[in-house]
Image (cartoon, rainbow, N blue to C red):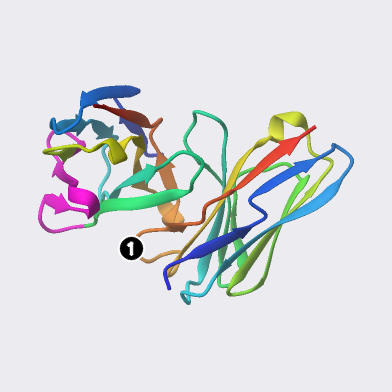
Amino acid sequence: DTEVTQTPKHLVMGMTNKKSLKCEQHMGHRAMYWYKQKAKKPPELMFVYSYEKLSINESVPSRFSPECPNSSLLNLHLHALQPEDSALYLCASSHRQGALGEQYFGPGTRLTVT
Amino acid sequence: AQSVTQLDSQVPVFEEAPVELRCNYSSSVSVYLFWYVQYPNQGLQLLLKYLSGSTLVKGINGFEAEFNKSQTSFHLRKPSVHISDTAEYFCAVREYGNKLVFGAGTILRVKS
């Protein structure tokens, strides 16, 4: 199984809502990533978790709060977002953060903030 | 910090014609390079990667790329494209901590 799953596929939320994005992988990978992709732009790294610990935070605003409850699951909690946060949010995983090799991407959650 | 430049934002090509998508990277001691494809409304799928060894790398769907250290390039090629290859292609370089830095992307449009 080389699949990374993400739920929901689409999400519309108001600026006062609290919502969460979920990502799951069962490949035994110990590094997991959140990327943000605006329309017609490349993905930009937001967070990296290594062995369930936050390893990299690319100066992301605190209205985005990541969580890694176990080695298979990665969440992104959203609160008080702005319309400019509307984007495709991609999750990825890899064997280990320091290991060579590719990252496996999920299909993404398309978020619209109204 | 490393960077990647994809020289063409869009490449139109007729079906069954050859195609080359260009990618240049900033120089570094060790370079690990990737090409990903993104079909509309989907995530990214790895086409191929260069970690070490042979400079000609073969990937999925008939794509290949050549790592050229002297020209700091990693161009993607396919000898004969299909309509189904229409997608956006991203070149990426691995930075510290397995961080991927992506180029701006090249949209490949295959016309019949």
**Is residue B66 one of those drawn in magenta?**
yes
Q: Position of residue B46 (x, y in %)?
A: 34, 53
Q: Residue at x 27, y 22 (%)?
A: B12
- From where the camera sits, is residue B8 visible? no
The image quadrant of residue A6 is bottom right
The number of discs equals: 1
Residue lying furthest front? B112
Q: Residue at x 25, y 48 (%)?
A: B29
Q: Secondary structure at mark 1?
A: loop
The image quadrant of residue B11 is top left
Residue lying furthest right? A16
Disc 1 residue type (three-letter): Leu
The quadrant of the rendering that contains the N terminus of chain A is bottom left
Q: Residue at x 42, y 53 (%)?
A: B96
Q: Residue at x 26, y 33 (%)?
A: B23
Chain on which label 1 sits: A
**Is residue B53 one of those drawn in magenta?**
yes
